[in-house]
Amino acid sequence: MNKKGFFIVFEGIDGSGKTTQVDLLSKALTGKGRSVVVCRDPGGTGLGEGLRNVLLYSRGPIDPVAEALMYGAARAQLVAEKILPALRAGSVVISDRFSHSMLAYQGWGKGLDRGFLENVNRYACMGLTPDLIVLLDIDPLVATSRHRRPADRVEKEGAAFLRRVRSGFLELSRESPGLYLVLDSTAPAGELFLKVEATIYGIQGFGR
């Protein structure tokens, strides 16, 4: 894979503040002269954005297995077209979601077999794993109260679904404590960012 850059992923349910933290980190690193590539999963490529539109805004039902395969297809294209080339060039890649979102949403949330989902991710990610996953943890009811736009398909699944997804993320973080930084996202955005920044600069080889 010959990865020279760093890959940082922000995870959490919608309304946890991922977009804010991605933006803060991107601006801070760019301001220090780092080459930064920002992406979102699903999305970030022509194919990915088309699949994102179907996954989030389709009015018809989508079978959970078909849904997982579409997420996998979008991720595979994102890795091949955008993430891996940027990492090979030495850039810092910051992604709003990645493979663990599928485990949490389609696994814990919708009950799909974890082995199946991990196989989808194995092919889609081509062996790529993040250097750091920042999990912005929040109660679903608090997260929902932050929404300022109409709910998409995922958000319409309801509070019980989001509670299962949140449990999935927390379990994944317990399984891989060295990979995760778990933060209470009800804290002020600036305070959260300082913790994110300190953790990233503590990664061996990241530099300043």
Image (cartoon, helix red, strand yellow):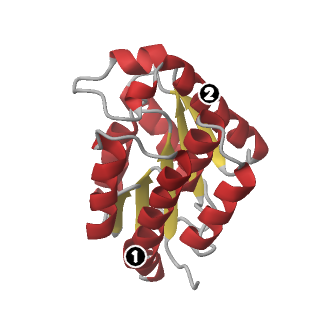
What residue is rendered at 61% in x and 64% in y? Answer: 120
What is the three-letter code of the residue carrying label 1? Ala
- Seen in the picture, residue 76 relative to 166 is either above or below; the reply is below
Residue furthest left as drawn: 149
What residue is rendered at 23% in x and 26% in y? Answer: 150
From the top left corner, tell me how far across and down residue 59 is, in percent. Answer: 28, 39
Q: Quadrant of residue 70?
A: bottom left
What residue is rendered at 62% in x and 47% in y? Answer: 103
Q: Which of 91 and 174 is in front in this view?
A: 174
From the top left corner, tell me how far across and down residue 5 is, in percent. Answer: 49, 73
What residue is rendered at 66% in x and 29% in y? Answer: 167
Q: In which quarter of the image is residue 104?
A: top right
Q: What element carries label 2?
A: helix
In the rendered image, is residue 84 in sight?
A: yes
**Residue bearing the label numbered 1:** 86
Q: What element carries label 1?
A: helix
**Residue bearing the label numbered 2:** 164
Q: Nearer the viewer, mark 2 or mark 1?
A: 2
